[in-house]
Image: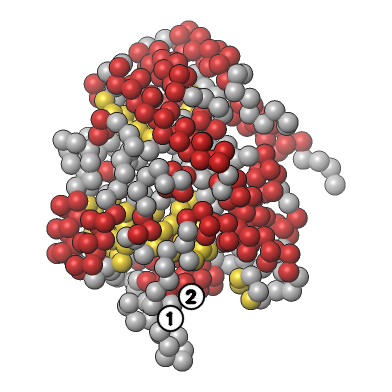
Amino acid sequence: MQRDTKVFDLIQQELERQRNGIELIASENFTSLQTMQAMGNVMTNKYAEGYPGRRYYGGCEIVDQTEQLAINRIKEIFNCEYANVQPHSGAQANAAVMLAVLKPGDKILGLDLSMGGHLTHGSPVNFSGKLYEPHFYGVYKETGLVDYEKLEEVAEKEKPKLIICGASAYSRDWDYERIRAAADKCGALVMADIAHPAGMIAKKLLKDPFEHCQFITSTTHKTLRGPRGGIILIGKDFENPFGAKDMKGNTRMMSNLLDMAVFPGTQGGPLEHVIAAKAIAFGEILTDEFTNYARQIQLNAQAMATAFTKRDYDIISGGTDNHLMLIDLRNKNLTGKKAQETLDKAHITLNKNAVPFDDKSPFVTSGIRVGVPAITTRGMKEQHMDTVVDFLDKVLKNPDDEKNVFSVSNMVKELMKNFPLYPEL
Ligand code: DSN
């Protein structure tokens, strides 16, 4: 068969784009070479519906071993009793937890998308807001911090079955203990979606959600630096408190319900090639090198916040505990859309983002979200953060000056030569 040079050409162009740019999208990262290579392997050819040792297809004896390795490693990382490594994404992981514990129409309570939450935490345009009855808490206007009082008030009034914590654009740690106390009062379960800060939680650099939340979901490609995908974890297995029974009338353990909710509930055949890559990435997380990486993420994020504040950028909540920050650009007379589009031309990639109580549409927005996991993987340290912010500021000060934008784009390319990406390729 003829090699498809058209597609391989585009892949090469994407590699060059990634090499030349400063990647500040908070949810992106660069996998190790071995993790990436494992995604292009023959296990993509294999059907393996079911779980290790109990599949619906023959020939699963090898993929059983990679999947079991991925399960064992992620359980060791988070010191937890149960892991499902099959979800194709974070959204799929959240869908499976909800399918396992909720009935259509049940109430859920999550952080409002416009305040930093996620689509799958009850947005009306997502399955979570269509199949279930969504209620929301937000953040305080003055401080940008989660409004736990509101969470407690809505929980008491609405008595949701599931309270969701976690966010896509929130730079502070969570009070899981307080959320669990509110949940216990109204008989709800708690799901922590740790997709963003998982890498720091894995290394105990942020609070531990396992102590207080019955379910933990995550993607594997953000701060965990693995392949694109999802996982579901539970610290301690428990009987389903909402009384779902199997056909023989026995109460189901939650691990069993979660397995069934992933397959056959919401997915078919698992992506065993991606699971092999997850196993490799999880092995990397268990090393000291990753501990240093997770620490460096936090140091870089804090150095970056200082560099922004020095230049009079308005960081929501005034700083960061994790890997990202949300910046309100209204004092700079700029929209998020304009900033994102102009920075793109300078090879600085980030995303426009609504800020809490935004007066602009989600397509325009008043803010940008900035994250450091990817540039930290490339080897940048605290001392480089000021340079990165300086480049960004140069562009945003004169967004319509094309010569200036072009000159910054050249400086970006030069800088990134010092931080090689996949030199073997
Ligand atoms: N998790 C989102 C992000 O943070 O970019 C995408 O769903």
Q: Residue lying furthest front in this view?
A: 288
Name the residue nearer the viewer: 289 or 387.
Answer: 289
Q: Quadrant of residue 3?
A: top right
Task: Give the percent coordinates (x, y) of residue 371.
Answer: 42, 33
Q: Which residue is mark 1?
A: 252
Residue at image position (30%, 48%) is: 174
Extreme-right residue of the structure: 1
Q: Position of residue 404 (x, y in %)?
A: 45, 9
- Residue at (41, 58) in percent of width and height: 216
Q: Is mark 2 within 8 Å of ligand 1?
A: no
Residue 46 in which image quadrant: bottom right
Residue at 49% across / 66% down in the picture?
82
The span from disc 2 to disc 1 (Cα, nearest Å) is 7 Å
Q: Quadrant of the C terminus?
A: top right
Q: Is residue 375 left or right of residue 394?
A: right
Q: Nearer the viewer, residue 36 or 177?
A: 177
List the residue tagged with mark 2: 256
Identify the secondary structure beneath mark 2. Answer: helix
Answer with left or right where residue 75 lies relative to residue 36: left
| Amino acid at pointer 1 | Arg
Tell me if mark 1 has few (under 14), some (14-19) or many (20+) residues whose alpha carbon lies within 10 angstroms of its own.
some
Mark seen at residue 153: none
| 294 to 248, vertically: above or below | above
Residue drawn at the location 34% of the way across and 26% of the way down: 305
Estimate how packed mark 2 is, as few (under 14), some (14 to 19) or many (20 or more) residues with alpha carbons within 10 Å: some
Element under disc 1? loop
- Which amino acid lies under the numbered mark 2 shown in the image of this protein? Asn
Q: Quick check: can you spot residue 230?
A: no
Snapshot colouring: secondary structure
Asked whether the beta carbons under mark 2 and mark 1 sit within 8 Å of each other, the answer is: yes
Relative depth, front residue between 398 and 303: 303
